[in-house]
Image (cartoon, coloured by chain):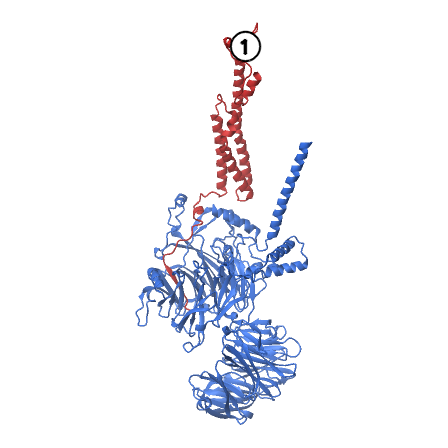
Chain colours: A red, B blue
Amino acid sequence: MEKGKGVIGFGRRWAVEFTDSSASPSSRDISDPPGFIRASQDQDDSSISRQKKDAEANWKSQKAWEVAQAPFKNLMMMGFMMWMAGSTVHLFSIGITFSAVWQPISALQGVGKVFEPYKDSKVDLLGPKLLFIALNLGGLALGVWKLNTLGLLPTHASDWVSSLSPPQEVEYSGGGIPFH
Amino acid sequence: MAARVLSFYLLLFLSIAQLGVSLYEDQVGLMDWHQRYIGKVKHAVFHTQRSGRKRVMVSTEQNVIASLDLRHGDIFWRRVLGANDSVDGIELALGKYVISLSSAGGTLRAWNLPDGQMVWETSLQGSKPSKAFLLVPTNLKVDKDNLVLAFGGGCLVAVSSIDGEMLWKKDFAAESLEVQQVVQSPGSDVIYVLGFVGSTQFDIYQINGKNGEVIHHETSNYAGGFSRNTLIVSDDMLVALDVTGSILITVNFQGGKVRIDVKPISDLVGYYSGQVELLALRLGRMFALKAHQHIALISVTNEGKLEVAEKVNSAAAISDALPFSEGQLAVARVHHEDNKVQLTVKLGNDWSTNLLDETVKIDGQRGLVQKVFINNYIRTDRSHGFRALVVMEDHSLLLVQQGEIVWTREDGLASVLDVTTTELPVEKDGVSVSKVEQNLFDWLKGHVLKLKGTLMLATPDDMVAIQAMRLKSSEKSKMTRDHNGFRKLLIVLTQARKLYALHTGDGRIIWSLLIGSLRKSDACGHPVGLRVYPWQVPHHHAMDENPSVLVVGRCQLSQDAPGILSFVDAYTGSEIESSGPVHDVLQVIPLPFTDSTEQRLHLLIDTKQRGHLYPRSREALGIFQQKSSNIYWYSIETGNGIIRGYAIKGSCIHEDSDDFCFEPRDLWSVVFPGESEKIISTATPKLNEVVHTQAKVMAEQDLMYKYISKNLLFVATASPKASHGIGSATPEEASLVVYLIDTVTGRVFYRMTHQGCQAPVHAVFSENWVIYHYFNLRAHRYEMSVIEIYDQSRADNKDVLKLVVGKHNLTVPTSSYSRPEIVAKSQSYFFTHSVKAITVTLTAKGITSKQLLIGTIGDQVLALDKRYLDPRRSLNPSQAEKEEGVIPLTDSLPVIPQSYLTHALKVEGLRDVITVPAKLESTTLVFAYGVDLFFTRLAPSRTYDSLTEDFSYALLLLTIVALVAAIVVTWIWSERKELQEKWR
């Protein structure tokens, strides 16, 4: 029974209990053995499981916070890499910058997945999720900022007119030195 | 962003590639071809001794002296003299030198016969311009040294043939004698100098050939007066025409005694009208008189009587007499019969005897025979045979022997006047191009060979085969349009009024046409070709319509002569239509409109500045009238120093006008002060140039808007003294002024003075910049300057948000009347070479960076990156500027030897370079012409948009196959291993 509960606690959705666990003695056909007091045992049993659940929730929320903070390390490392890459456009810097943009985006897409294991009625996941999102957005901002410093974002007038063909002329004029 | 990415790629490419456009040795001839010509032959001297190579020495109207192989017509050697150094005569001397007299008797040179090395050169300073003769007497010797007699500039000079030393000189100009002929008395040292003083006095000098002393001088008079058309007949008789050209004067000076006889020409040839001319031929005791569309051959009897031997049509050509065995002379006469040419060699002493009578079939597109030179050889049966060198109307050169054309040279291509290009036919089903197509096996074999070459497994024989395959690639010489637009037809108009279509792949002649309407006729005495324009370029009906070109010509050289228009099909080379003589043509303005058949509208301007619209159809007229309020033209009067601008006033009002004629309205004029400025050069942007963008992005994302207008004119003027050759003005006197003028309003946008600089100026205009080349007298060096113009009135368009949503006026059509504000930036640099022509590369979309193509004085074409001529260059460019590709400023432009497009070749007598965009954006086609023709393909920024030609597809294929095989093998292997694991 204990084992079964423990297993339930660790992610099983449903389970069939083959042992009898009904609490009311009246519903039983068989009387309890002499010296067996059902009430006290039941009580004892439930308190143990509650304790277990609390510990589990605690552990989950702790883990969730840890996961939420993980992008921070990533952010620091990315920043270091970007600083190393310099501000000129070449293969290395472009690669790093694009990965710096891509990583937060893919992480944000999978926010639900990341926090799935820590989902519990007793655990409030909003805080860690928000932190996780904020940190990833920070990472994304860093990436975009880097893109901009590399000049790969169309934030200048030149980016919008560089392929603008010259305007047509209303007048047409020809001529030159006469043939000789 | 796009710009940045593009610049990133460009940087990537440029960091790999050098700035030049260098070529590997084995790439020569892959995409370029070079054709060598000599031009229209005017003198020919045969050199055909028993031993050694038989050759003929020729001099041409393009100032070329060449030695040709008599067997194949190849050039043994060739020397191209300067543009003003026209050849007066060539002779052989001592059996090993070719002596040439050129520059109207100013320069005498000896060339080594076998290899064309110059042996000596003597400059003969005459006192006065005169006729020029060269005489190489066979037996006039001074101390074993043969003399060469040259007459020029009024002086008779005897020069040693060994070292060119001047032995004696006799000046006749001082005695106001106009020398007409110089003859050596046969078998003696006496030289006769014959000439006129005034119009009536005839003088004869007998001169000792060894020391130049006058032995005897005699004069006599003829009251009727002499014209200057004279001829020597049989060493002791001068034939001349009188002033009226109706009386033939024979002057017999045998033994120094002068006897003058006269005879009216009508007595000899009967009725005639028009001009009479003595043909400059040496025919022994005969001479040829051209009168009334006939040539009369008149023989002189021993008693001095004149008899007409034969009258032939004036379309015939007669050779000089050739002595071939003791005392016998042979004269060749060529005339046309239907589409065949009759070559007759007659005995000069007895005109009724034919030595040879042959009929030769000559292509009708070669026109009439212009000149014929004969040479004899001994046949195996010891009889005399004759070969004839024939110069045709289209300037081609033919050798005729035993009734067959032995070889032909297309020397008309040495005098190209104008060039245009057309596309080739589209490849369609049913039209076989199998003549040049390879089969699969050959293709495979070729690729295997290539692969071997790439993997360095090829033997030397294979290498040779690979190289031959690359050079003869059928891909480049196909007669259909290709994907990259490399294959085109070059339509070339030559001075001989012949149109050629050359294939850009290998330079072969696809068709040629002697333009019928531009041939000599009663209405047109001396027709000349002027220009060739693309007339109809079918895009919509490219499958079933042929493009055509417009050839503009004139009846005479003078500007007011009637014009001739001819429309020629560019695929078949046949004249579709011609009109003429029509009004005179000063200018042809191709308009930017086409009618429904895609014929381009052209406005032809005549001497009264009236515009004539072509094509002459109602539809064209409708289109033109709709747009006529925005059509302007200008004319540059270099003589007066005035540029005038015109617009259309209305239909012509004079009597013989039609609906297609338009009266001009004077709009503006720019008058240059005549005493200080003379127009020496102009440049305009090319009409067909495509500009990709109007914005120029500077470092730090700064933005400037280019001022791009096709209605701009660059004019360079110089002080009158400084407009001639270098050295004619001191630095203080010389000044060069450049202008940028709007040709719609006449507004001068920009003016700049270069003190101490002078002509010649060569300029090129493209996009928003103009580059010009001139001489700086103070620095004693050539300089090149660049002017870039920017539009300041658009400079405010810098708000990103507005640009993103499209709220800007950058694409609104502009008018010259809106008075744009112009900012010009300029910079100058020294340049090593003097220049014959400058042009700029053109590409299909105008994205590729530009290169200047400079025709140097050494007759080569040099590519120079436009980035060297950038006004933003500074001594220490900032990091951002460096990144952008701004080169640090240097005082002179570098000449990188690898960037000569012509590599080891020379385009002798280079006159112009033209560029044509290919379909492939990175590539431009370059055609340089002069006496020679040269064509190549150029990618100014490397071929970034295609794989190189020698890319090994076979290697790629092999790699892919190998990889797939490896995958399959490893997969099978792993499966097997897994299975074994499971059984264990």
- Residue at 30%, 72% (x, y): give it: B655
Residue A81: image location, x then y, percent: 55, 37
Q: Nearer the viewer, residue B942 or A39?
A: A39
Is disc 1 surrounded by few (<14), some (14 to 19) or many (20+) residues within 10 Å?
few
Number of marks in the rendered image? 1
Q: Residue at x 37, y 69 (%)?
A: B606
Q: Secondary structure at mark 1?
A: helix
Q: Residue furthest top?
A: A34
Closer to the camera, A30 or B560?
A30
**Placement of A155 over or under B183, stated as above or below:** above
* Location of mark 1 (residue): A41
Position in image of residue B611 (x %, y %)? 36, 67
**Hey, which residue is sitting farthest bottom in the picture?**
B303
Left or right side of B323 for B336:
left
Frontmost residue, B817 versus A172: A172
Is there any visible trace of residue B513 in the rendered image? yes
* Quadrant in the picture for the C terminus of chain B: top right
B166 displayed left or right of B645: right
Residue B659, by quadrant, is bottom left
Determine if residue B42 is in view: no
